[in-house]
Structures are given as structure tokens and as C-alpha cells.
Amino acid sequence: QPQTNWWRGAVIYQVYPRSFQDSNGDGIGDLPGVTQRLEHIASLGAQAVWLSPFFTSPMLDFGYDVSDYCDVDPIFGTLADFDKLVARAHALGLKVLIDLVLSHTSDQHPWFKESRSSRDNARKDWYVWAESKEDGTPPNNWLSIFGGSAWQWDTRRQQYYMHNFLTSQPDLNFHTPAVQDALLDVAKFWLDRGVDGFRLDTVNFYVHDQQLRDNPAMPRGNISNTAPMVNPYTRQQHVHDKTQPENLLFLQKLRALCDKYDDITTIGEIGDDHQYQTLAQYTEGNNRLHMAYVFALLTEMCEPKYLHGVLAEYLRDAGNAYVCWSLGNHDVPRLVTRWAALGGDERQRANILGAFLMSLPGAVCIYEGEELGLTDVDVPFELMQDPYGITMWPEFKGRDGCRTPMPWDHSAHLGFTTGTPWLPLGEAHGNKTVADQETDVASVMNDYRRFISWRKTQAAVQFGNLKLLDAHDQVVAFVRQHGDETTLCAFNLSDKPATFKLPAGVQGSNIGGHDFSGHLGNGQIDLGPLQACFARVTGV
Ligand code: TEU
Ligand code: CA
């Protein structure tokens, strides 16, 4: 595989436009706001920005419910604002990835309005419609990620329609060729507008089993905990409602379209019970997706042995997949809070985890605010916006805690807005603003900058293959190999000093130029609490 594609080993910065920067005082972040702040992203050394959805939407799932794929929601701006954003990003050397939500639309999309209007219209098969069972209950046992049956009764058609997420997010029917064509046209619209690629929302949910077979139950005691977003009440294996083989054919068409343009990339969000096999399948052979987004580190589990296990499983099952790792996004509690069990203080935790993430093979996504070491915000129920949180309260607190606005400086609302912010700013974020961190050499933000720029000098860390070293109670250690360069990376993910004995015959010299103090010598690595070590080695 050539390493020349810009996206290999890239650092991709995820922007949640609602919460990044408001430019007009309505309390909601928007595209002109993002444009104003692109310099911040470029200053970190990121290669690309991924924008969460900004398309026309009733915002019941804050933009993941699209009612017009080819326009900008007025709350976020206009197509002209988008063009300015892309131009500015490109001028700063940043690629722009947009978030296509093709699996479902909003129920306010004209396609759905037409489809539901009768059993006989031009778009009657554009969504997944099915008869009820004899007794009026839904066609099968499929469950929505957001709770309850995946089927909603429609009084006009006297049929059920399927929705993997909210009832207001009906699933498109990918078995209808015209649906696939329409969605390819959407991708073409944005490629022609100059985007550099796509993050594809729920990419393995596109195609469902046409026979509508029931999903089998999950064996007791085997409830996967790898994606905290998964509905905790869903106790079924999603065998028939997603990840169907026909999907690969659609992905091939999408890839063929992308290949008509230069330097495009696609990152598929794949949530699956057999995540690694699916990642491999979806990125195999240079004619499907370029990259697959890994869920495994979005979990609550942060013990070194678990993380070692994640990497072992990845090596075993996804060896040929090109992956994109992340430790946070707009769906899960913020990292330093979610992984508080690692100990140390927030700054140490943020720094070591950032370095750990950026030492993994593949590309990485950093979620806005992660570079500031932001904590999760406790949003009180009265202020809660996330529909998922509102339904699942109080067992699940929803996703607002990681979606609060970015703290920029000490002007009103920490520089986010002059109006009333749509979600409260984190009180504890007041001393973690970008302005504060700019002037503090030892801030998380400056650590991130230094690590990213150091990483660019380390071909093995950016592009190398992964070889895991032995599991350890405190340390996760591996080597990355590229050409004749072998770099050992070791992370003490505990708040106590640690010693990691090297396998016999491994020798090396420490590599400096980053902020970590771990040390290789005498056949072992000595690491302070939450410290890392990087060394050029031989004999692995
Ligand atoms: O999230 C998909 C999602 O919910 C996964 O995390 C899911 O839990 C997993 O695939 C199950 O195995 C995306 C967006 O990131 C989210 O914000 C949206 O609400 C959702 O799709 C619906 O569009
Ligand atoms: Ca605004």
C-alpha cells in the first residue's frame, strides 16, 4: 500500500458545528464560526477536519436527521458559507470531510413525505415498509438503537416502516436501485463542491434482510460493552437488520465515484457485533471504503489488559483493514472523565491518552476539545437536549455532556457566543480555554501540538505495522515497523511507576523530541505514572 495518500496516518479533527463557534449570537455554532476557527485546527498540525452534519434538518437528532442532503440548514449558514469554509481550510492545508447520513433521512424529507403518502406513488419503495403480523404487531423483533421496536406504524399506508434510530429517522430502502442512485448523486454534489471525502454515518446499517427474519437473542452474559452508545436494553444480535452482503456492492459504486476525483477518502462508521471482520471486509481490496472507524476505544473500559486485548483482536481479525481510531466523539462521554479510573490528574491523563491514540496504526480522529483535555459536563435533565438521553434518563445520561460548546477565551460564554448557548458551557472548562492553554507551554493543547509535530518526523509511528509486546498489568507496549525503522512505543496507563521487561535480544536507544520521560535501558523500560517511552529498537 502506498503511504503517499494524504489520509494514511492522518490526524483528523472532528468538529461538531453546533458547539464549535457561534458567529451571529443565536447561541448555536455555525459554518462561518467554524471558518473563523480553522486556524486553531491547523495550528494543532491536523491534516483534515470532519464536520458533523450541517444539512437541512428538523434537528430532532441534531442534524443526523436530514431533510435536504444538498443544502445547508439556515441555522448553520448557506452553501456560500460552506464554500468559504472549504476555501479557507484548503488555504490552511486542511482537507474537509463531511458527514453523510445515508442510512436514513428525516421523516420531513420530501422523499419520505411522498413515500408515506400512499401505497402507490413514485417513491413507494424508497423506505422499508412492511405489513403488520396477523395480530397487528410489528413485522419482526428488530429493535431501534434508541429504544423500543425498530418499526413504527403509519396510519396512512396502514403499514409499518423501519427506523434503526428515532421514529423520525426512517431507514431508506437500499434494495431499491433508485435510492442508491439518488444517494450517489448526493455524494457527487458534494464532491463537485470540493470536499475531500466523507465520514459515512452508520455505514453498515444501509441494507437490511429482505426476508425480514427475526434477530436471534444475545446469549446471556455476552452483552457487548464495546460501544457505550448501544442501547443497554437491546439484547439481540443484529444479524438481519444490518451488515448484509449486498451493502458491499453499494460501497463499490460509491468508491468508483470517489475514484473519479483526486485524493478522496471515506471513513465508514461501523458498529457491529463482529466489528473487526466487518472492518476488514469493508476496507478490503481498494474498491470499497478507504478506512473504517473503530469503536473499541469508545468504551468505558480502560484497563491496560483490555486495551492490549483490543489491539490483539484487531491484529487477529482486521489485519488488512485500514482503520481510523478515536477515543472520543459526539456520542460518548469525554475521555478524561470516562477513563478517570486511570488516575493521575486530568492533564496527565489527556496527554498520555493523546499520545497513545496517535501511536496506533492507521488514521486517528480527535474530537473537538480533546486537545484541551475537556471533562464531560453534567447537563441537568431540565437543560438536556439529546432525545436519546431524554428517553433513557436516568440510567443513561445521553450525549449532551460531550456536546457542550468549546471554551475559547474569557469573553462572554467563554468566547463561544454573545447570545444564550444552546447547551451550557462546562463550568470546569473556564480554566481550560484555548487562550489559557496558548500561553501555558505545558498545557494539553501545546503537548498535542508537540506530539503531532514529532509524530510527523517518525515514519514508523505514522505508517508502520503493529506488533504487540506482552500484556502487562500497567503497561501497553508495542512496536511499529516501517521499512528498516522499528519504533517501540510503551505507555504506562496507571498512576504508579512501572517496569516493563523487554523480550530477550531487544535493544535500542531512546528517541527524544516529545514530552514523555519513560526510559529504555538494561533490557527494560522504566516509566513514571502515566508516562510513555519511545525508542528505536532492534531484535524484536
Ligand atoms: O451513531 C451511530 C450509533 O448510534 C452507533 O454508535 C451505534 O451505537 C452502533 O453502531 C451500534 O452498534 C451515529 C451518529 O454518530 C449519532 O450521533 C447519530 O445519532 C446516529 O448515527 C444516527 O444517525
Ligand atoms: Ca449561530
Image: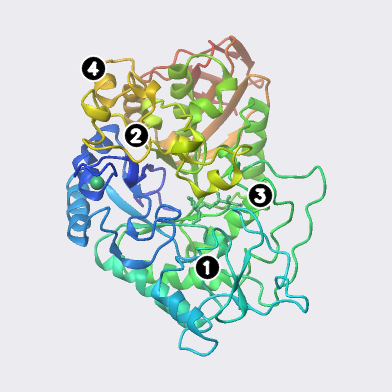
Mark 1 neighbour class, 10 Å CA radius: few under 14, some 14 to 19, many 20 or more: many
Q: Residues within 10 Å of mark 3 (few under 14, many from 20)?
A: some
Label 1 lies in ligand 1 vicinity (Cβ under 8 Å): no
Residue under label 1, please give it.
Answer: 170
Residues at marks 3 and 2 touching, judged by CB atoms closer than 8 Å:
no
Q: Percent from the top left, x then y, of residue 30?
A: 26, 48
Name the residue located 63 percent from the left edge and 19 percent from the top edge.
474
As drawn, 352 above or below 78: above
Label 3 or label 2, whichever comes before in sequence order: 3
Mark 3 vs mark 1, foreground winner is: 1
Determine which residue is flagged by label 2: 456
Pick the front one: 352 or 378: 378
For label 3, the residue is: 317
Q: Earlier in the sequence, mark 4 or mark 1?
A: 1
Whole-Å distance between the Cαs marked 3 and 4? 44 Å
Q: Compute the Cα span from label 3 to label 2.
A: 28 Å
- Per the image, the residue denoted by label 4 is 439
Q: Which mark is residue 355?
A: none
Q: How is the image coloured?
A: rainbow
| Spot occupied by residue 268 in the image (x, y as percentages of width and height) | 49, 56
4 vs 1, front mark = 1
Secondary structure, mark 4, is: loop
Does label 3 or label 1 sit earlier along the sequence?
1
Q: Nearer the viewer, mark 4 or mark 2?
A: 4
Please determine whether, in this image, residue 112 is positioned above or below residue 337.
below
Classify mark 3: helix, strand or loop.
helix
Q: Secondary structure at mark 2?
A: loop
Q: Are marks 4 and 1 in contact (CB under 8 Å)?
A: no
* Secondary structure state at the residue bearing disc 1: loop
Name the residue located 48 percent from the left edge and 60 percent from the top edge.
289
